[in-house]
């Protein structure tokens, strides 16, 4: 008897999935435990296995297509079995024989799909973060004609949160590059084609338009190879004349500092130059004196227009800036924000921090103490640890605090999972690690998702008080100002004391004013009595 298999829910937040790749085709015999397909969820691409034996009679969702959870994915049954009654009006075409079925994949918004030659793999722009809608190819590490092995890094792709290495899952030759360095494309657009050397892939629309001639294709491929090679050695030629492998961030820092990358020894994978190599580089003595002003001019230095002359420059928005604009605009325009500010006495916190930091191998910051106090206050005020949905309010039973970190291109929010189970020293260690990797663009998407509350601190810049936009789907965010010395009243006497202002931005759909005020009172109690947080 035929069995209907629906799009599975592979994560707790998954509402729809994308069939990244079918590993079987219609007519194949299936055994329990066989991997049917790779399905891209909101968090990762996961293998989906069969729990049944039989023959794959029908595929309901093609490769590259998105479908909601529980939509018909496939049907498994006995060979030749009539499944017309199970399709329920499905538009999927029914072949007369499984042998007549061709494996097809849509690689562009065209009305027809082209058959993929044997052994050829079509690679599309991957979804490398849960909020990624488009990506920019920062650097190609392979060029057309190169041999590619499974696990090789194909390219560095800039997402809305980080620049990440994208590796190949296939062996073969890089036959086509669909997105050039510096170009931006939506998720699932053709990125590259890998297959046997010499395979004709001109028929795969979306990679090479049908209107382009064979000679034009060759010229385009040649131009791409030249461009990749020029980018690879633009910062300087290695002594051997080969290409220089360097991360985008390290390349930018080197350009800003006028460093010749051919003189830098890389410590990354396969000798790749990374940020720390450039920052720790000391030029040889002979090269320390510049031969001309032009040689040390930084491309980042802006020249201003002469007095009385108008001038401007348009700078392309990065993926991170676009994502910040989308998420914060969406939050500000949909969530009714209101703000509560309270002043906290920090004298005891200053004394406690000094005592803690006198311990061997221990160093905590005031921000660590704030994060710990927030985690403990959220336990007592679960209404603040919620998320709004149209029909329900989600009460998060766990507490995971996001800590806003400024990076050169904008802002990221790495997350401390289960923060309430960490002590202050553990929070400090974890935050330092996340912040360092955030600035190096080495965070994974999983490390930037799942927060239930957020802390943003500008106190180190001398900002005494500010308001933040809520990091959806959180219901609140805490803005932390600088610690300042000022006259305060203690025991009816005016004395010098240290205070700090914190402002809580709340979503009025989930957190009422009294609830937010009570949360701040509890937070104040913990910060003014740090001994209560040392457990």
Image (cartoon, rainbow, N blue to C red):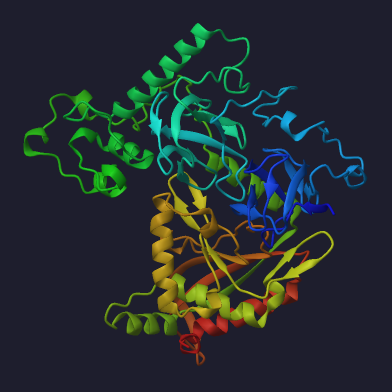
**For residue 427, above or below residue 529:** above
**For residue 199, above or below residue 348:** above
Residue 500 appears left or right of 331: left
Is residue 260 visible to us here?
Answer: no
Residue appearing at x 81%, y 54% in the figure: 3
Residue appearing at x 54%, y 29% in the figure: 120
Residue appearing at x 47%, y 29% in the figure: 182
**For residue 43, above or below residue 418:** above
Please state, as top left, top right, bottom left or bottom right, where the N terminus lies in the image. Answer: bottom right
Q: Nearer the viewer, residue 259 or 155?
A: 155
Residue 97 appears left or right of 451: right
Q: Position of residue 465 (x, y in %)?
A: 54, 63
Q: Position of residue 433 (x, y in %)?
A: 39, 63
**For residue 177, above or below residue 489:** above
Quarter of image, res 208: top right
Q: Nearer the viewer, residue 8 or 375?
A: 8
Q: Nearer the viewer, residue 133 or 126?
A: 126
Q: Position of residue 324 (x, y in %)?
A: 59, 46
Q: Nearer the viewer, residue 141 or 262?
A: 141
Q: Position of residue 200 (x, y in %)?
A: 53, 18
């Amino acid at each position: 008897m035929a069995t209907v298999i629906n799009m599975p829910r592979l994560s707790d937040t998954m509402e729809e999935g994308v069939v990244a790749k079918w590993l079987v085709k219609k007519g194949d015999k299936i055994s329990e435990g066989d991997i049917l397909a790779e399905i891209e969820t909101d968090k990762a691409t996961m293998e989906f296995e069969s729990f049944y034996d039989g023959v794959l009679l029908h595929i309901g969702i093609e490769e590259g297509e998105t479908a909601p959870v529980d939509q018909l994915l496939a049907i498994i049954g006995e060979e030749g079995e009539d499944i017309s009654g199970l399709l329920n009006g499905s538009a999927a075409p029914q072949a007369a024989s499984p042998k007549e079925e061709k494996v097809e994949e849509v690689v562009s918004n065209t009305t027809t799909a082209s058959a993929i030659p044997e052994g050829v793999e079509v690679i599309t722009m991957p979804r490398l973060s849960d909020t990624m809608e488009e990506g920019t190819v920062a650097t190609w590490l392979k060029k057309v004609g190169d041999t590619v092995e499974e696990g090789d890094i194909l390219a560095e792709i800039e997402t809305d949160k980080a620049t990440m290495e994208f590796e190949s899952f296939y062996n073969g030759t890089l036959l086509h590059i669909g997105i050039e360095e510096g170009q931006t494309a939506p998720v699932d657009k053709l990125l590259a084609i890998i297959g046997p050397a010499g395979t004709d892939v001109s028929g795969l629309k979306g990679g090479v338009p049908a209107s382009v001639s064979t000679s034009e294709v060759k010229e385009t491929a040649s131009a791409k190879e030249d461009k990749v090679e020029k980018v690879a050695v633009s910062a300087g030629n290695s002594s051997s004349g080969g290409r220089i492998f360097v991360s985008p961030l390290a390349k930018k820092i080197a350009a800003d500092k006028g460093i010749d990358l051919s003189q830098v020894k890389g410590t990354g994978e396969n000798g790749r130059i990374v940020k720390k190599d450039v920052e720790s580089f000391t030029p040889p003595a002979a090269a320390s004196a510049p031969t001309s002003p032009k040689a040390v001019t930084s491309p980042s230095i802006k020249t201003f227009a002469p007095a009385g002359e108008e001038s401007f420059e348009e700078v392309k928005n990065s993926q991170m800036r676009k994502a910040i604009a989308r998420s914060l605009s969406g939050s500000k325009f949909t969530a009714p924000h209101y703000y509560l500010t309270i002043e906290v006495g920090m004298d005891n916190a200053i004394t406690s921090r000094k005592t803690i930091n006198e311990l061997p191998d221990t160093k905590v910051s005031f921000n660590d103490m704030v994060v710990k106090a927030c985690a403990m206050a959220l336990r007592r005020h679960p209404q603040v640890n919620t998320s709004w949905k149209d029909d329900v309010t989600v009460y998060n039973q766990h507490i995971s605090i996001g800590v806003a970190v400024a990076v050169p291109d904008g802002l990221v929010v790495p997350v401390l999972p289960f923060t309430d189970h960490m002590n202050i020293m553990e929070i400090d260690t974890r935050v330092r690690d996340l912040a360092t990797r955030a600035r190096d663009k080495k965070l994974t998407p999983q490390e930037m998702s799942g927060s239930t509350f957020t802390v943003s601190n500008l106190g180190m810049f001398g900002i005494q008080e500010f308001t933040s936009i809520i990091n959806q789907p959180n219901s609140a965010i805490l803005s932390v100002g600088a610690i300042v010395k000022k006259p305060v009243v203690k025991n009816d006497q005016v004395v010098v004391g240290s205070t700090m202002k914190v402002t809580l931005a709340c979503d009025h759909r989930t957190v009422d004013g009294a609830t937010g005020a009570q949360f701040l009172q509890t937070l104040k109690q913990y910060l003014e009595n740090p001994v209560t947080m040392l457990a």
